[in-house]
Image (cartoon, rainbow, N blue to C red):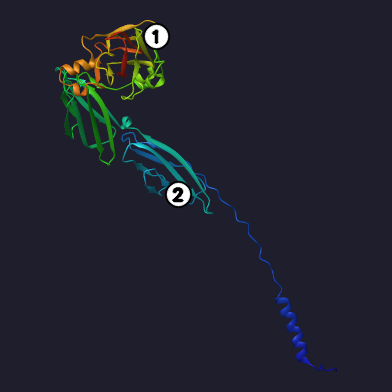
Amino acid sequence: MRKLSNPFGLLFCMGALVLASCSKKVDPVQQETTIVNPLADYTVTPDANDGFTFKYNNLSKNFSKLEWRFGDDTLNTTDSPTHTFLTTGKFTTDLKVFSSTGTFSHKYVDINIVPDSVLKVTAEKTGNPLELKVSFVFKGTAAHSTWTFNDVDPTNSKTTKVTYTDQQTVTRTFLYGSFNSFSVTVTSDKGSTATISRNITPDGIATDITQSRIAWNSTNENTVQGPNEGAAKLIDGNPDTKFGFYSAFPVPEIFTLQFASAVTVKLYAIENGNDSNSSRDPKEWNLEASQDGQTWDIIDHQLLTIGFADYLNSIGQGATKYKRFFYYPIANPKPYSWYRWHIISTFQTAFQIEEFRLYK
């Protein structure tokens, strides 16, 4: 029998084979990651009893977490929150949802809370001369309110400030011929606040509708000074600009405003010029109204014996005789779609007026 001459050599060779076999590298199988794309979606439902509160119903898909931002520096991470805004204004709600793989999606919705949508004011005559009952209606639970009235004395233009707190209705007596302003601020039991400001006369609340016109025209135009003192300045809403005509003014001047639908004008205003005393003031005019732009009704007629600035001089207000508003109520207001200021004559030959305004 043949003997192995070197058994250790055999063991060495076998070990080498094993090591060679173990050193062979096997690459792991790469698993492909599936990206999950979320979809942000929701609906918004206003609270029927609170104009500042909204319910958000989350309809998002494929998300693992979410963030609500409401445009008022607040953050909410609940699924379908209810949110109360603390002021009026425009707020953009941003819902951001994240998937389990880190991708995300947004949905934006604008919430516009205008003061008139949550707070309304009314004024009714009480039956007593020059007296009004002024009230507010609030879409929410009112916890606190403040009325501020700025009463103007039409003879000297002095303003008296009067305030009331925590009253839904106040009764006020105004001076004859006065044009006053007021504001009311209401705070809800949740801390939400809204403020409305209005003009008011002894006949009621006066809202300027001049800028809501859809068309206008004038029979005369300033072709010398051009647009800087053109007819458009009469209704541009700027009390510091004017319509001027400095040669013989061709009368009648007819300045017409058209509205999209019939509106009831209860009051109109004229702001006199910035110089020349009363020489360029209108002397006689009609305010006329029409349903079709063809047939016109005279709803007010004025014939002045003294011009605006001269009148203010006569009552000791010469220091503030320019750029003053003069207000004329309509005795029997009715709805019309067209209104026009029909100027029959001026005090001399030229013409200038800063503003002409219509109020409902």
- In the rendered image, which quarter is residue 176 located in? top left
In the rendered structure, which amino acid carries the disc numbered 1? Gly
In the rendered structure, which amino acid carries the disc numbered 2? Leu
77 in relation to 333, above or below: below
Identity of the residue drawn at 30% across and 12% down? 334
Q: Label 2 near label 1: C-beta < 8 Å? A: no
Residue beneath disc 2: 66
Gap between marks 1 and 2 measured at Cα: 58 Å
Q: Going by the image, does 65 lie left or right of 194?
A: right
Residue 80's spot in the image, x, y percent? 41, 44
142 in relation to 206, above or below: below
Q: Residues within 10 Å of mark 2 (few under 14, many from 20)?
A: many
- In the rendered image, which quarter is residue 205 located in? top left
Q: Going by the image, does 171 lie left or right of 334?
A: left
Residue 122's spot in the image, x, y percent? 24, 24
Res. 168 visible in picture: no
Instruction: Name the quadrant of the N terminus.
Output: bottom right
Instruction: Name the quadrant of the C terminus.
Output: top left
Element under disc 1: loop
| Residue nearer the viewer, 3 or 100 | 100
Identity of the residue drawn at 36% across and 42% down? 83
Q: On residue 293, which mark appears?
A: 1
Identity of the residue drawn at 39% across and 9% down? 293
